Image: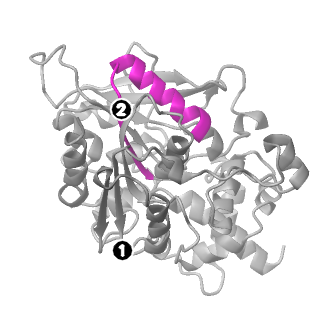
């Protein structure tokens, strides 16, 4: 493989494995989950990251229509609330993480600084989603995760199956329409899913933090190289359906990338996400010491197509006849973001230093929403924020989360 091709592919791997969403702050041994009786096993996300802080937390399982079994966590009430408010209905909120991490990514900081617990302390019924392929979502009704067939999916399936399944589950449990929060890839699958009307009867409003709907203006050197990569090559190179960043081939890519002339691996977070203003360095130390989780190689290819092609479209199978087989047309259908109901309350928050969710790309997204009801669209621009600040920023409560709370509380 030529050096330029190696750099392109390695950069693509690094971009998607390390940056579309920050690493989790805890090791891969942190967790197992239980079924829908709501109790938590010793090592689950609830036990390791929620109940230890005095919050009630339930572990749930959700089955998608294509057979994947997903884990969810529920924080139903404030810390130390007791039984005084038993039976009172609370507004449910569903929180969706990005790629190659799970719901733990929302719980990196202290209870006073992480979004799920802030929401719970403000009277919301909080549900944390986890997508297929992550450590607690490696089960299927008939497929073993060791089989290539288990990994035959991209973010199209997150749009069509995972998100509708968790929405339906939360709605059936609460009998109330749901507020949605997504960060990074969680914004992309939310926007695409809502544009196809999947949650029309269960969605109350949506908040998108650091949206990555369009990615063609990504302003990092690694991002620019990744956008030019021949994405089909990645499947051949790794030779497996599961992309495991902890595997030998991925590790070798990263080591070779770091040795490539002109590549600085000292501060990769800044190099790819932009200069984050407000991170707690002890938290950063925790998450950079831990490796990301698996996803489907096909999912990585689809994300790279989104970067390269500058459109929000379904997975491109690379040949017109293959696309016709799947879609009935030579090119993959485009997700029409402007088809999102114009009266859906939407909150968008983006940063001036975000190298992934570039300002120009967010403006493209806003242009897609130009016919949205003006009183239903709230936009926040934070000059100093980059991609990871929205999840781990020490001042995110004051700058972002209080605005999210105000937005949700105004939806009646």
Between circles 1 and 2, the one closer to the viewer is 2
Q: In this picture, is 159 found above or below 388?
A: above
Q: Residues within 10 Å of mark 2 (few under 14, many from 20)?
A: many
The answer to whether mark 1 and mark 2 are in CB contact below 8 A is: no
Q: Which residues are magenta?
A: 159-183
| Residue 158 falls in image quadrant | top right
Q: Quadrant of the C terminus?
A: top left
Residue 43 seen from this side = no
Display coloring: one colour
Asked whether residue 89 appears in the rendered view, the answer is yes
Q: Residue at x 17, y 36 (%)?
A: 121
Q: Position of residue 136 (x, y in %)?
A: 52, 32
Asked which quadrant contains residue 394, the reply is: bottom left
Label 1 SS: loop
Which element is circle 2 on?
Answer: strand
Which SS type dominates the magenta stretch? helix
Quarter of the image with the N terminus is bottom right
Using residue 168 as the reference point, say whether residue 116 is left or right of it: left
Instruction: Quickly name the residue at label 2.
Output: 178
Asked if residue 164 lies in the magenta stretch, the reply is: yes
How far from the left and from the top, in percent, is residue 386? 37, 69
Q: Which residue is mark 1?
A: 352
Near-viewer residue (49 or 172): 172
| Image position of 218 with respect to 26: above or below | below
Most extreme residue toward the right is: 321
From the top left corner, tell me how far across and down residue 366 is, in percent. Answer: 43, 63
Q: Percent x, y for residue 23?
A: 46, 54
- Residue ID at (16%, 31%): 79
Q: Is residue 51 above or below residue 97?
A: above
Residue lying at the far left of the rendered structure: 84
């Amino acid at each position: 493989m030529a050096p330029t091709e190696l750099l392109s592919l390695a950069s693509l791997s690094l971009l998607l494995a390390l940056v579309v969403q920050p690493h989790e702050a805890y090791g891969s041994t942190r967790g197992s989950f239980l079924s829908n009786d709501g109790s938590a096993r010793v090592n689950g996300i609830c036990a390791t990251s929620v109940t230890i802080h005095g919050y009630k937390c339930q572990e749930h399982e959700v089955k998608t229509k294509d057979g994947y079994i997903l884990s969810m966590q529920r924080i139903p009430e404030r810390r130390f609330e007791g039984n005084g408010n038993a039976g009172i209905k609370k507004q449910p909120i569903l929180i969706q993480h990005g790629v190659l991490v799970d719901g733990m990514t929302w719980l990196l900081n202290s209870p006073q600084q992480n979004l799920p617990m802030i929401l719970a302390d403000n009277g919301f019924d909080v549900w944390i989603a986890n997508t297929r392929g992550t450590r607690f979502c490696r089960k299927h009704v008939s497929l073993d995760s060791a089989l290539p067939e288990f990994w035959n999916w991209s973010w199209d399936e997150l749009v069509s199956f995972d998100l509708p399944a968790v929405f339906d589950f939360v709605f059936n449990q609460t009998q109330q329409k749901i507020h949605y929060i997504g960060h990074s890839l969680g914004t992309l699958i939310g926007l695409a899913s809502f544009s196809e009307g999947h949650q029309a009867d269960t969605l109350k409003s949506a908040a998108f933090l650091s949206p990555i709907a369009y990615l063609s203006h990504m302003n990092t050197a690694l991002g620019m190289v990744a956008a030019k990569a021949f994405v089909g090559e990645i499947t051949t190179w790794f030779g497996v359906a599961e992309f495991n960043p902890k595997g030998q081939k991925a590790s070798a890519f990263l080591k070779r990338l770091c040795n490539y002339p002109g590549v600085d691996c000292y501060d990769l977070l800044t190099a790819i996400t932009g200069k984050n203003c407000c991170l707690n360095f002890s938290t950063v130390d925790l998450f950079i010491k831990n490796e990301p989780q698996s996803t489907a190689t096909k999912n990585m290819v689809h994300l790279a197509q989104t970067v390269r092609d500058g459109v929000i479209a379904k997975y491109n199978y690379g040949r017109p006849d293959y696309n016709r087989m799947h879609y009935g047309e030579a090119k993959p259908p485009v997700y029409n973001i402007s088809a999102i109901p114009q009266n859906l309350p939407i909150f968008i928050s983006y940063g001036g230093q975000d190298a992934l969710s570039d300002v120009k790309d967010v403006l493209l997204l806003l242009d897609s929403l130009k016919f949205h009801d003006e009183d239903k669209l709230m936009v926040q621009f934070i000059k100093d924020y980059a991609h990871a600040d929205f999840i781990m920023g020490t001042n995110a409560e004051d700058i972002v989360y209080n605005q999210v709370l105000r937005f949700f509380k105004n939806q009646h």
